[in-house]
Image: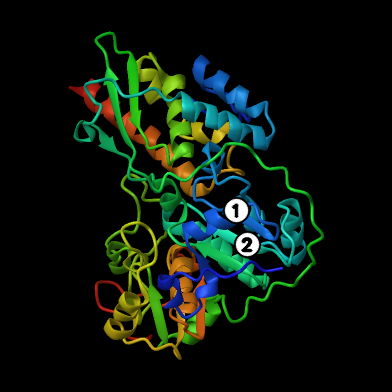
Amino acid sequence: MSLPFDQSEKLAAYAHPEKLVTTQWLADHLGEPGLVVVESDEDVLLWNTGHIAGSVKVDWHTELNDSVTRDYVDGEGFAALMSAKGISREDTVVVYGDKNNWWAAYALWVFTLFGHPDVRLLDGGRAKWIAEDRPTTTDAPAPTATTYPVVERQDAGVRAFKEDVLAHLGGKLIDVRSPQEYTGERTHMPDYPEEGTVRGGHIPGADSVPWARAAAEDGTFKPRSELEAIYQDEKGLSPQDDVIAYCRIGERSSHTWFVLSALLGFDTVRNYDGSWTEWGNAVRVPIAKGPDKGGPA
Amino acid sequence: MSDDLDPSPTAGLPPAMAEIVEDFQALPDRERLQLLLEFSNGLKPLPAEFDGHPELMERVDECQSPVFVVVEVDPSQAVHLHVSAPPEAPTTRGFAGVLQEGLEGLPAQVVLDLPPDVCSRLGLDRAVSPLRMRGMTGMLARVKRQIRVSTAA
């Protein structure tokens, strides 16, 4: 049973207003049957310091990723996770998190790989909820295990692998990292030359659109008209384009994936989760350095 | 010094740090995080001379959050660590708390001789992402560098 959609005016302008809710909507519906709130943060301890009442923590590192292979959990793993968190296939899931919802968007994207029917993002995330002095608690919920079906993960359509990106060279690519990472000026942290990636730069032909350009001061998404001005007017993308977004490990590009697919209604947007930690370490893949996009190799 | 042939997580550690490592190692994964949260809550507030003065401290770039660290080496060569880390970064605060408690009052040379992998001895690698672990390793590296600078003068 799905909860009603948020009818707020700002959200109504987006291509898929049913994919997100405002903090007011969540405050109004908190505790209703059929709603599960999920917090997903970069910081694995943040939820423990205080969270929206009844919310369950889903950790990207220990719960969504496979612990051995660099991949996501499989259908059985996801079903077990959902069951443990008290989430049914019919539930409306609202995800929120820290860092402008990077990890929340990433979690939502993983839910999408398993086709969870109704999953929405809290516009503004954890920061906005707290900035509005809305209540939090350290009480841990005790979810009742559900029977979540084993659904095979469907990567096609929303996830790109390195081979897909190689085949896509010459097509539309968006690099959402910082300008310094894009140019290759920053390849590693000071004092740690051995960490990160062995090569700096970007995938040839990729446009630089740092993820933060889609975010307003308060962490909410910018209104649709402002997003169109960036991605469509300035970068010349069109909703019919086949677009691949990437960053360092796929979390910031999940934010942009959400912007393009849910807010602007692009039909084909894939997140390349291997991102720069794969590309910048891969042997013999083409790389462009400097501020120019560089042509396809 | 750490030795690749010695598998003990406390090998080469001064007593206070060895005790912290033992406390972590004695717990199952989930409770290790809870202990880290306690260290996060126990991080001491900055002394007055640094409070509100990040320009007097060093930013730890390896941390995603604004984290600042400053080390004082007193006339007896004992080390005192001060760290500023926001409440939105409890994991980083927790690591800072571990270092603060584990290093407090140690002779400068003992801190310089700490094995570089001391952070991973806590057994949090499975629960904490590599990026976070890098933040803590970065913090320790900066602590050592500041000690080297202030003891060389």
Nearest the viewer among A90 and A253 is A90
Residue A161 figure quarter: bottom right
Please determine whether, in this image, residue B6 is positioned above or below residue A257: above
For this orientation, the residue located farthest to the right is A147
Residue A191 figure quarter: top left
Q: Position of residue A15 (x, y in %)?
A: 47, 81
Residue type at mark 1 is Leu
For label 2, the residue is A93
Quadrant where the N terminus of chain A sits is: bottom right
Quadrant where the C terminus of chain A sits is: bottom left
Residue at 47% across / 84% down in the picture? A266
Residue at 43% across / 85% down in the picture? A169
Describe the element under mark 1 as helix, strand or loop. loop
For this orientation, the residue located farthest to the bottom is A240
Nearest the viewer among A148 and A294 is A148
Which numbered dot is residue A30? 1
Considering only order in the chain, which callout, 2 or 1, is on the residue closer to the N terminus?
1
Describe the element under mark 2 as helix, strand or loop. strand
Camera-side mark, 1 or 2: 1
